[in-house]
Image: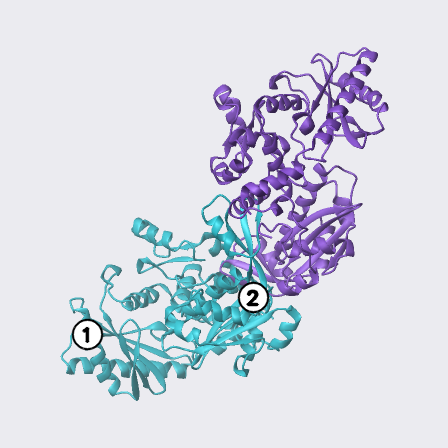
Chain colours: A cyan, B purple
């Protein structure tokens, strides 16, 4: 199929119809009216703004999340903004279908209206980056910058977003570490079109720095500080509305890599599947274990009630902790995988063996040291290799016993919010409960991360 | 038993009787007469000297090796010395019971006379170290220095030599790397007595430099060069007759370590066993393998016809080569042991397992490199960890297959004189022929090197 044809077919699926567009416009008008009226009734000096993809008309068909921001004057003290903002949100939401309180940097109201999710978030009414005080304040500036610069290329953004979703590289959440919607918009504005962005995948990586608003000229030192700080990232995209920020700060090498190879593949052999992939194939983790001759250790434990931004990094850190500790103990960790489902979190470790030798060789002090005599007396058999003393050490054979001992002796670096839970974990060898079977297969086969699949 | 008593008992065994002494004196007189007469008959300008422990009266009872040195004038060209020296040796030896030609730096005659081995070695008649031209020339100087400085402490030397023999630390040959007779004599001259030497075992190690002839004052720069060059040795004993030489150059840390601990043990609990040990206990290598949960790989191959000074270091280097290569391949080498018996040489490796996983993880290039695309295309499954690509690699499971492959691909560093032989080696797993059974036990149990036994 020709590239044009593929793109046309995809566009048909992702561009909102006139009917959908009318529904959204009506919905936003209603919400604005309700907000304005409520603000007026309460006698507040607050301006309502819509931000996000609906406000920018870069949303995908059927994908409707309203972001209604309530902008307070800069002079409002932070505490007052938080309290009044939440109050105001509640009153507005009271006029909609339902709501609950959600938590980010500060609490906000998450409402539903006509089956659409409406986040009502208080912020400061900033005019420039120097005024930004809370993490959400920039959104109004982002919105304005995109509206001023997009110049009708809204469908190109839609294509890029859908492509990124299809290859599983969309979303800056910690779980994904992919491309945010704002980053996709910037790339379209910078390179011109969806295809231009794909064609520049390699160039972007080599050039590394994208600076669409020319901050390097306008605020050189601040921008250089940002560049230095972010030097290890695959991309540094200086935020057009704030030179202190890398828009791609949460983009991982792994997610950029997926985009990198898929972009090339699409250009060589375009198909709708990049946008709408068929389900990843699955298989048996038993068969994988047999094929590879490796072993799967799975720790399953209670998921503590913390947000993903805390949980995921701690799970990852703990997996790396096990990798280090086990390798000190003579087990090689070929890979690891973490996650959670429902109330249960897990750490999977692929290791080279389940039993090690019973006796290992322990290096001691050098001959001429004071400790040499102690070492000599404490051990049954002692010998020298060069100037260093050595002796035998009896060790636990089975990896499960080794893990239990490591945990008891606090010799594994584990994230503090999951430490107690990990210590109580079930430890399974070469077997997982059925709800983890597919995860185990995707991990062991590396299909989970396979750039080729 | 008291120290004095032990020493008295040992001295009874190691001091030559009057009868033995008379036999040796008569033997040396006869040999000197034969040598002088032969030299005269042939009209040569050569002086016969006796060197070694018989000449210094520091030999152990029953331990009779005559060293008869034929000293040529300094002006003799080296080639002439070698040829005439060998000729002269042969004529002298022709008047004894039997002889053969042996090889060191140059060939010499090894004769037998009245059941005593007589080495007849040509050398230069040097008066000081500046004149030394061949490795053996120093012997006459050594002999002279010891005779001048020993001052009747001959029995103390005998005690120290027998002690070093008993703990297996005597002899500077490459196979032992222990204390030479000359080194033992110097230590007695320096510290005064056998017990004084033992009591100084720790002090020697800390002080490191022994300079009995005050070379540091007399030839500071040359001596400092020697010290610098030998800095990694356990001891630096500046040769009283040559500041360029460390008498302890061949003393290994391992052998010094044995002396170090045994000296202390003897002082704490003296016994004759240090001088005359009962045979090392033996056991089953099967039982050791079971106890430790490790595996024994033995390579057996034809011993090439080279001297120990060449063979042993090459065997050791090859064992270290296997240690490195196998560890790159995921096998841990806990220890190694080399040697030969008759015409067969062997390399033993104690490893943590005999089978490894069938699939291993191969790191590839970094994402932004030119090679990344190649790597991506060549491998079936490819994923990123950070900025680096990874893929699976199928590998041989069994350690014997791994070793064969390593040898075929020349990926083991092996001494050049044994390279062909090692490539043809038999490779045995957890089994050795009966002539290696005890060696395997001593190695696996580390009794071979156990400082405590």
Residue A150 as seen in the image, left or right of residue A371: left
Residue depicted at x 29% and y 71%: A105
Which residue does the image show at 41% across and 75% down from the upper left?
Answer: A421
Crowding at mark 2 (Cα within 10 Å: few <14, some 14-19, many 20+): many
* Relative height, residue B251 to residue A436 (above, below): above
Pointer 1 and pointer 2 on the same chain: yes
The first of marks 1 and 2 along the sequence is 1
The subunit carrying tag 2 is: A
Q: Nearer the viewer, mark 1 or mark 2?
A: 2
Instruction: State which quadrant residue B61 falls in.
Output: top right
Depth check: give the residue in front, B48 or A256.
Answer: B48
- Give the spatial CA distance, label 1 vs label 2: 48 Å
**Residue named by callout 2:** A451
Q: Position of residue A282 (x, y in %)?
A: 59, 77
Q: Specify the farthest residue to the left.
A: A43
Q: Secondary structure at mark 1?
A: loop
State the residue in front, A255 or B383: B383
Q: Nearer the viewer, residue B181 or A40?
A: B181
Looking at the image, is B107 positioned above or below residue A110?
Answer: above
Kindly give the residue lying farthest to the bottom in the view shown. A97
Q: Quadrant of residue A343?
A: bottom left
Q: Identify which residue is drawn at 75% across, 56% down.
A: B427
Q: Is residue B84 left or right of residue B275?
A: right
Q: Position of residue B303 (x, y in %)?
A: 78, 44
In the image, B226: left or right of A82?
right
Q: Position of residue B131 (x, y in %)?
A: 63, 17
Identify the mark at residue A46; answer none if there is no mark.
1
């Amino acid at each position: 199929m020709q590239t044009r044809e593929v793109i046309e077919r995809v566009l048909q699926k992702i561009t909102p119809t006139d009917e959908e567009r009318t529904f959204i416009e009506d919905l936003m008008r209603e919400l604005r009216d309700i907000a304005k009226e409520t603000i007026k009734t309460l006698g507040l000096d607050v301006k309502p703004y819509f931000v996000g993809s609906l406000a920018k008309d870069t949303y995908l068909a059927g994908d409707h999340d309203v972001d209604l921001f309530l902008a307070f004057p800069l002079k409002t003290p932070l505490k007052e903004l938080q309290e009044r903002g939440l109050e105001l949100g509640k009153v507005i939401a009271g006029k909609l279908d339902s709501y609950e309180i959600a938590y980010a940097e500060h609490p906000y109201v998450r409402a539903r209206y006509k089956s659409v999710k409406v986040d009502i978030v208080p912020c400061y009414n900033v005019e420039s980056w120097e005024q930004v005080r809370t993490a959400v304040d920039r959104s109004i500036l982002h919105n304005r910058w995109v509206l001023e610069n997009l110049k009708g290329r809204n469908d190109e953004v839609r294509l890029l977003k859908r492509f990124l979703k299809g290859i599983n590289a969309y979303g800056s959440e910690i779980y994904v570490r992919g491309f945010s919607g704002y980053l996709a918009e910037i790339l379209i504005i910078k390179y011109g079109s969806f295809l231009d962005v794909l064609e520049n995948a390699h160039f972007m990586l080599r050039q590394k720095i994208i600076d669409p608003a020319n901050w390097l000229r306008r605020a050189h030192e601040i921008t250089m500080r940002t560049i230095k700080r972010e030097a290890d990232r695959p991309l540094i995209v200086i935020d057009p509305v704030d030179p202190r920020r890398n828009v791609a700060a949460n983009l991982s090498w792994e997610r950029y890599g997926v985009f990198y190879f898929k972009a090339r593949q699409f250009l060589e052999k375009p198909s709708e599947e990049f946008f709408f992939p068929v389900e990843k194939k699955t298989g048996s983790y038993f068969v994988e274990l047999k094929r590879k001759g490796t072993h799967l250790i799975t720790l399953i434990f209670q998921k503590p009630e913390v947000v993903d931004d805390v949980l995921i990094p701690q799970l990852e850190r703990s997996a790396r902790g096990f990798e280090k500790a086990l390798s000190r103990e003579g087990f090689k960790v070929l890979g690891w995988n973490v996650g959670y489902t429902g109330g249960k979190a897990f750490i999977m470790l692929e290791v080279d063996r389940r039993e090690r030798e019973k006796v290992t060789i322990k290096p001691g002090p050098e001959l001429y040291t004071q400790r040499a005599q102690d070492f000599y007396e404490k051990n049954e058999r002692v010998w020298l290799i060069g100037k260093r003393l050595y002796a035998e050490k009896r060790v636990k054979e089975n990896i499960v016993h080794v893990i239990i001992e490591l945990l008891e002796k606090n010799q594994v670096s584990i994230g503090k919010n999951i430490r107690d839970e990990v210590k109580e974990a079930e430890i399974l060898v070469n077997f997982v409960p059925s709800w983890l079977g597919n995860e185990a297969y995707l991990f062991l086969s590396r299909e989970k991360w396979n750039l080729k699949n």
